[in-house]
Image (cartoon, rainbow, N blue to C red):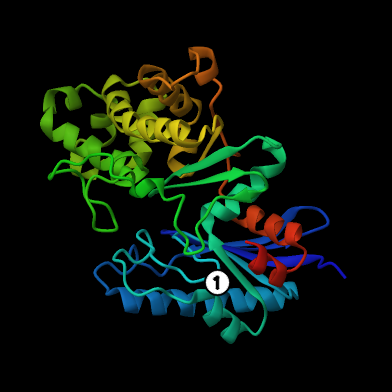
């Protein structure tokens, strides 16, 4: 008999979301959010300690949810590369350094006593858009505290069994020795440059490099001290048409556009769906500026009009991983089948 509901969870660098997914209505209920017990809450803590905290947090909160939902399976979308058997290989936005692979699926199954599916958060989110994007291949890109990506083609998410693939945020976009440092420890990664955190850091650097320009910007009204500049102020300034803030955003988007052109040139994907807190907060202006950069760089074989149709915004909420995890389990029939087929 088909399951009527699953417990779904989405663990990101800042927030853990847990909800009940109803297979009959394709709806979420009982959505609960709590800060992730990762490096944001415990800066400087060693990787093994943060891993233990994450396992304990998931075991406690997901366990409560499973009992509330009377669920027979849990699907977890996780912010990091995940192997086919549910091992988390790295989690730069959750525990920073690489550390040892974490057998998260096995640990949660032992503690919760029910089938568990663990997938990368973007892998889960892709399944939210499979129906709306139809049969055409597409690349889902998230721009939030970091950058991630996944490509869907021919009925599957393109992934190596060891979880490789879809980590566009760790593509080295700037090879210079003084390039911004990524959460993973590397330098010049796309996520360190074009993510929300990367854009905020870039705005602060620009303010120090051009104090007169910053003083004339709307940003200075919200944050006279550049060290206190946050993304809320940056987003508001971009949406208001502030020239200084827009120039900062363009600088990051040039790198993101370069990454997209490399994906297109490599495998020919012509559709890019953008999600993530930063991109969605900026809204249509983000797509407009990114498209301008794509046209400036060019996509071999495509006209300017065709390039103009490449990028769209995803749904304006933070439920991508939750809905996608529920649809993934529903599509596969059972949690065990989902594990085997992923």
Front-most of residues 232 and 320: 320
Identified at 52% across, 55% down, the residue is 159
User: Looking at this view, is 231 or 137 the one in front?
Assistant: 137
Q: Where residue 227 appears, x then y in whole percent? A: 19, 44
Q: Is residue 17 above or below residue 37?
A: above
Instruction: Decide if residue 319 is in sight here.
Output: no
From the image, tell me which residue sits under label 1: 85
Q: Is residue 209 above or below residue 293?
A: below
Question: Relative to the observer, which residue lies in front, 42 or 297?
Answer: 297
Residue at left offset 66%, top offset 53%: 323
Question: Would you identify the image quadrant in which residue 39 lies?
Answer: bottom left
Measured from the top left, where is residue 274 in percent x and y?
Answer: 51, 37
Secondary structure found at label 1: loop
**Any part of residue 25 in sight:** yes
| Mark 1 neighbour density, 10 Å: few (under 14) some (14–19) many (20 or more) | some
Q: Height in image: 4 above or below 190?
A: below
Q: Quadrant of the C terminus?
A: bottom right
Question: Image quadrant for the N terminus?
Answer: bottom right
Identify which residue is drawn at 74% across, 53% down.
27
The percent coordinates of residue 339 (x first, y second) are 64, 68
- Out of 257 and 231, give the one closest to the viewer: 257
Q: Is residue 337 left or right of residue 143?
A: right
């Amino acid at each position: 008999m088909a399951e009527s509901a699953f417990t779904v969870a989405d663990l990101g660098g800042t927030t853990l979301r847990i909800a009940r997914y109803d297979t009959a209505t394709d709806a979420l209920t009982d959505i609960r959010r709590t800060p992730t017990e990762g490096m944001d809450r415990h800066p400087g803590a060693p990787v093994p300690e943060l891993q233990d905290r994450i396992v304990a947090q998931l075991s406690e909160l997901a366990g409560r949810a499973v009992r509330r939902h009377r669920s027979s399976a849990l699907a977890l979308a996780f912010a990091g590369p995940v192997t086919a058997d549910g091992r988390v290989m790295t989690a730069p936005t959750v525990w920073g350094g690489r550390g040892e692979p974490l057998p998260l699926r096995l640990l949660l199954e032992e503690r919760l006593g029910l089938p568990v599916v663990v997938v990368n958060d973007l892998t889960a989110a892709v399944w939210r858009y499979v129906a709306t994007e139809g049969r055409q291949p597409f690349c889902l890109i998230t721009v939030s505290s970091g950058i991630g990506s996944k490509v869907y083609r021919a009925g599957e998410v393109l992934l190596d069994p060891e979880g490789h693939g879809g980590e566009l945020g760790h593509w080295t976009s700037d090879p210079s020795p003084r390039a911004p440092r990524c959460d993973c420890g590397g330098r010049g990664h796309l996520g360190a440059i074009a993510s929300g955190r990367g854009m905020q850091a870039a705005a602060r650097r620009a303010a120090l490099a051009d104090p007169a320009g910053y003083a004339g910007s709307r940003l200075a009204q919200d944050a006279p001290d550049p060290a206190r500049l946050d993304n809320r102020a940056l987003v508001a300034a971009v949406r208001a048409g502030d020239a200084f803030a827009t120039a900062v955003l363009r600088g990051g988007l040039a790198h993101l556009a370069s990454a997209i052109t490399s994906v297109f040139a490599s495998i020919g994907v012509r559709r890019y769906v953008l999600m993530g807190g930063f991109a969605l907060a900026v809204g249509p202006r983000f797509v407009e500026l990114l498209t301008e950069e794509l046209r400036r760089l060019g996509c071999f074989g495509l006209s300017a009009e065709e390039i103009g149709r490449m990028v769209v915004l995803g749904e304006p909420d933070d439920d991508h991983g939750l809905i996608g995890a529920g649809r993934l389990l529903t599509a596969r029939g059972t949690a065990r089948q989902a594990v085997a087929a992923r």
